[in-house]
Amino acid sequence: MADLLIVDDDEDFSGAFRVMLQSRGYDVAMETEPKAVLPRLNQKLPDALILDIMFPEDKTAGITLAREIRKEFPDLPILIITSVKQAFSLESDKPDDDRARLPVTDYIQKPVDFPEFCMALDRLLGRPTIYLEGKD
């Protein structure tokens, strides 16, 4: 069973995703405060992190947190969830410019399609995709 950590200020969204992910066999913890994430990761590292980008107190808190996590835990898979309607660059043609790329493994846009999200998460964890009922 894979351990996941959802970091999102929207407890309703996180709670709903927690229930759905638990039904697929994941062990899911939640965190609403970006500042609490690094200490938590130092205590127990999940198999993957699901991270919102924008938080009410700081619109770039998720990006800042992803960069901090990347420095301390370079191999931790990070899947961001965002309502920002723009394409993100996960790679950079400017290797020395940290601002030119998003330090995450993959991203999904809100509103989140749960089957699409599960496929992205399965890829992230190297798991075979488990198709949900009604999906081919």
Image (tube, grey):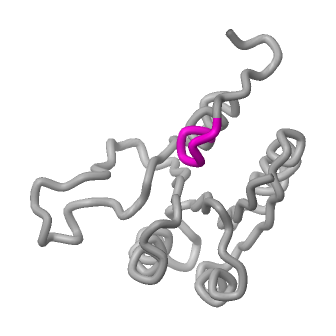
Question: Please, is residue 25 above or below residue 74 in the view?
Answer: above
Q: Quadrant of the C terminus?
A: top right
Secondary structure character of the magenta stretch overall: helix
Question: Please, is residue 12 above or below residue 21 in the view?
Answer: below
**Which residue range is magenta in the image?**
122-127
x and y percent of residue 11 in the render?
Answer: 79, 62
Q: Please tell me which residue is depicted at 73% across the width and 73% down the height of the picture.
A: 31
Question: Please, is residue 41 above or below residue 11 in the view?
Answer: below
Q: Please tell me which residue is depicted at 63% across the width and 39% down the height of the picture.
A: 127
Q: Is residue 98 left or right of residue 133?
A: left
Q: Please tell me which residue is depicted at 41% across the width and 42% down the height of the picture.
A: 85
Q: Please tell me which residue is depicted at 64% across the width and 81% down the height of the picture.
A: 41
x and y percent of residue 46 in the render?
Answer: 68, 68
Numbered circles on residues, count: 0
For residue 25, which quarter of the picture? Answer: top right
For residue 7, which quarter of the picture? Answer: bottom right
Residue in the foreground of this view, choosing between 101 and 45? 45
Q: Is residue 109 left or right of residue 104?
A: right
Question: Please, is residue 95 above or below residue 134 in the view?
Answer: below
Residue in the foreground of this view, choosing between 33 and 117? 117
x and y percent of residue 97 in the render?
Answer: 15, 70
Residue 21 is one of the magenta-drawn residues: no
